[in-house]
Image: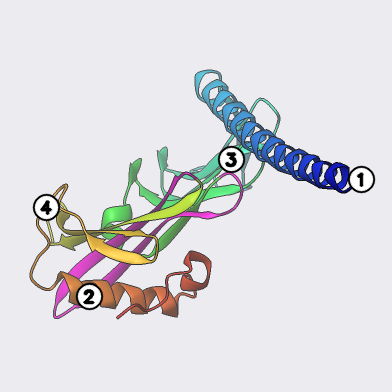
């Protein structure tokens, strides 16, 4: 009887583990299928665009151009002024989730030069990337944090750029955050001498934006 009880308990544990692994498998499969569906919707929306123009009375030189997914949801919208895209370009995923907003001027995105912090989201509403601008000692820095995933664990990449007027942003430092540790990365460039100081600036800005709660990073130095 005792042996049967031990065997029964063992089988229950095995079944529980199997059930748990099946749930994980289904969840990942569902996530993949949702992303595949979104990609299909996006490709169709680009190759066979469904476009509407929201025209305002007495404003013949201004209207809102709206593109739609095959499922009927809004893909993106952008103001058209004097025949060119000018204003805020707003894009969505095929499930209605906001993807990102970015200014556009005369048909050209101006994210690198507007000096405005921005945030983008993934299909499920999680923060996927964050850009923060900061002027320090008369120098403008752009901090771009991307949220990657390796084996379901958060893996963050921080790129620090120095922006000079009339020049392309120069990558001067790169960090990786994984398993609770910030590490310098040397894949693109050797970090500048004040890279740790710049990292601290970014972390303080992150906290002021209340994004550190989501990223679960906080101030580490």
Q: In screen coordinates, is 201 left or right of 78?
A: left
Which region of the structure is painted magenta? 123-151
Q: Nearer the viewer, mark 2 or mark 4?
A: 4
Tell me where residue 45 appears, x and y as whole percent.
56, 25
**What mark, if any, has residue 189 been given in the picture?**
4
120 or 25, which is in the foreground?
25
Residue where numbered disc 2 is placed = 135
Q: Is disc 2 placed on a helix, strand or loop? A: strand
Is mark 3 in CB contact (under 8 Å) with mark 2? no
Counting residues from the N terminus, which is met first, the one under dot 1 or under dot 3? Answer: 1
Tell me where residue 43 appears, x and y as whole percent.
52, 23
80 or 34, which is in the foreground?
34
Q: In screen coordinates, is 92 left or right of 96?
A: left
Residue where numbered disc 3 is placed = 93
Is mark 1 in CB contact (under 8 Å) with mark 2? no
Q: Nearer the viewer, mark 1 or mark 2?
A: 1
Counting residues from the N terminus, which is met first, the one under dot 2 or under dot 4? Answer: 2
Distance (Cα) linking label 2 and label 4: 21 Å
């Amino acid at each position: 009887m005792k042996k049967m009880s031990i065997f029964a308990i063992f089988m229950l544990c095995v079944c529980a583990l199997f059930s748990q692994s099946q749930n994980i498998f289904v969840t990942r499969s569902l996530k993949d299928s949702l992303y595949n569906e979104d990609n299909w919707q996006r490709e169709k929306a680009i190759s066979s665009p469904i476009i509407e123009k929201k025209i305002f009375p007495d404003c013949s030189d201004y209207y809102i151009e709206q593109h739609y997914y095959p499922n009927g949801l809004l893909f993106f919208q952008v103001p058209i002024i004097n025949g060119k895209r000018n204003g805020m370009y707003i894009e969505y995923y095929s499930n209605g989730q906001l993807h990102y907003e970015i200014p556009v001027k005369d048909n050209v995105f101006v994210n690198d030069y507007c000096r405005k912090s921005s945030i983008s989201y993934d299909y499920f509403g999680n923060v996927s990337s964050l850009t923060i601008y900061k002027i320090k000692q008369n120098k403008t820095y752009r901090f771009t944090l991307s949220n990657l995933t390796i084996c379901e664990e958060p893996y963050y990449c921080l790129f620090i750029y120095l922006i000079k007027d009339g020049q392309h942003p120069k990558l001067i430092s790169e960090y990786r955050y994984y398993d609770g540790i910030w590490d310098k990365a040397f894949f693109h460039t050797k970090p500048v001498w004040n890279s740790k100081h710049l990292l601290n600036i970014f972390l303080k800005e992150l906290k002021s934006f209340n994004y550190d709660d989501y990223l679960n990073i906080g101030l580490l130095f």
